[in-house]
Image (spheres, helix red, strand yellow):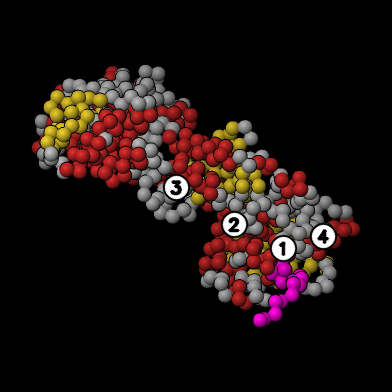
Amino acid sequence: MPQTPRIALLPDLLISQIAAGEVVDRPASVLKELLENALDAGSSTIQIQLEEGGVKLLRVSDDGGGMARDELALALTRHATSKINSLDDLERVGTLGFRGEALASVAAVARLTLTSRQAGSDRAAGQHAWRLTDEPAAIPQPAALQAGTVVEMRDLYYNTPARRKFLKSEGSEFAHCAEAVKRIALAHPGVAFTLSHNGRVALHLSASDSRVRVGAILGDEFLAESRCLDVSAGPLRVAGYCALPAYSRARGDAQYCYVNGRFVRDKLLGHALRQAYQDLLHGSRYPAYCLFLEIDPAGVDVNVHPQKTEVRFRDARAVHQFVFHAVQRLLASPLATLSTASSSEVPTPNTQVSPWPEQRSAASAMHAAEPAAFGRRTHFQGSLHVGEPAGAGTYLSFVDAAQSPEPAPEELSNAAGDDGRAPPLGYALAQLHGVYILAQNTHGLVVVDMHAAHERILYEKLKQALDGERVATQPLLIPAVFTADALDVAAAEEHSAALQRLGFDVAAMGPRQLAVRSIPALLLGGDPAALVRSLLGELREHGISQLMTTRRNELLASMACHGAVRARRLLSLSEMNALLRQMEETERSDHCNHGRPTWMQFSMAELDRHFQRGR
């Protein structure tokens, strides 16, 4: 029987190397810790120099408060820090670093040199800086440094070659270092950062405000496709930018979430944000956002993970609901509300859509009678059941102004709504190939995908109706009879009560036939047989319990897609304008149920630039 080894204390160097494995796994980890120390020191300018991806050399220079001569040796000792002194300090951490392990861990697996000059010292002590290496029995030596601290790391894992084998290529390690700089720079726009690699500047960020910093790192396209968020509730505040679904990504590489200025990958916050985007993104797309959560330090535990990328909230449910509702309300805000909040334009009152059948207008009938003009037969579809928008005279004056060669500003102002202000989406001018609506607003040209827009409108109305258990139904004058297999007939009979709750009255006409006697009034434009056939397929696949709970929104989205106006459907001007007014009052109308944009704006400046006007 082999002899059991005796318990013994580990050598200090081995203890430090084991601890380094928790904090330092690649050069980017070292860079993150050094940047956090520089920011905690009050730096306004930070310079980073890398060689061979940070493996050969990683130098961070700052202009912060610096350290005194006798503090240099302590800084390289494990669990030595100036940021906490007691348990109360640990429960209310207000700095980025606080464990006192970073420098000691780095010194255990690399060659480390500290050079620092303390700010505000007297002339005798502050006339020069001090340098200290991590060699045994080393003492601080005089050095030249104008201000702040320089931390230089060389030859990462030189004494642990097994760990060095796990490092990636030089390009990959540099990419991780650059990402670490971007993450920290996003949360500190007032600090200037310069990153150079192998003697070449790879990133330079001047001190600026948060919007400029976000645009410099995430791109102007992200800003253009994002909405600004700033919501407070008691001790909680969330601010930042949430990208619209049109800017969704195939990977989650544009998701930046911060808690009290610290970049985190928190499951609770991630779940709240996924739920907020759930009704806008479908499939495997990932939302993009840059959000900063501010909370009382006593309400969050940052001492959960050695690398401090995970946190634990004292009231996790409250934080989850706060972030979820703040982002959901931002993304769901109707266009009219956003226009009122962001500019002086106030939309005209919404034109309500009657769920009951109406006579088609003469213009609509005339268009339907002339399909040959488009070179093909127009698909039949019933009326959209929209009425003439308010202020028809105003619209006509707007069209007159649009048709003039050079409309004057006062003419456009005369085309405003009843309150003297034009609606955000303007007024319809024409329909393009039966697919797009062309409209003019005060900024220029608006192009609307009418199917996608109508689909979102129907979807939101169906959700509201089902939530209030007031789905209005419309009996069909002639029931729609269609052939179905035996399983569909059985499903219709078994779930007749659930179908009626959704607004459908379906009855068996024989062993292989079903008749649709009534459908939801909102879906009168759709094909009753296709609607019921799709609904029965969902019932057979998922069951009624899932369809009415976890998959309810997917079911309603499918119903809205079947009921929405189809391509090649010719609309009258009154129908087009009524659709625009509904879009302005509908939540999430910027995107359809599948995450596609419903409209685009082309400004006059863009059109002039395209046609080279003024050159």
Residue under pointer 2 = 181
- Residue 406 showing in the rendered view: no
Task: Work out whether 76 lies above or below 421.
Answer: below
On whether residue 308 falls in the magenta region, the answer is: no
Classify residue 355 by image quadrant: top left
Residue under pointer 3 = 287
**Which region shows up in magenta?**
1-17
Classify residue 484 by image quadrant: top left
Q: x%, y% of residue 434?
A: 20, 37
Ranked by sequence position, the earlier of labels 4 and 1 is: 4
Residue at x 43%, y 26% (from the top left corner): 345
Q: x%, y% of residue 15?
A: 72, 68
Q: CA distance from mark 1 to mark 3?
A: 36 Å
Q: CA distance from mark 2 to mark 1?
A: 18 Å
Q: CA distance from mark 3 to mark 2?
A: 22 Å
Ranked by sequence position, the earlier of labels 2 and 1 is: 1
The quadrant the N terminus occupies is bottom right
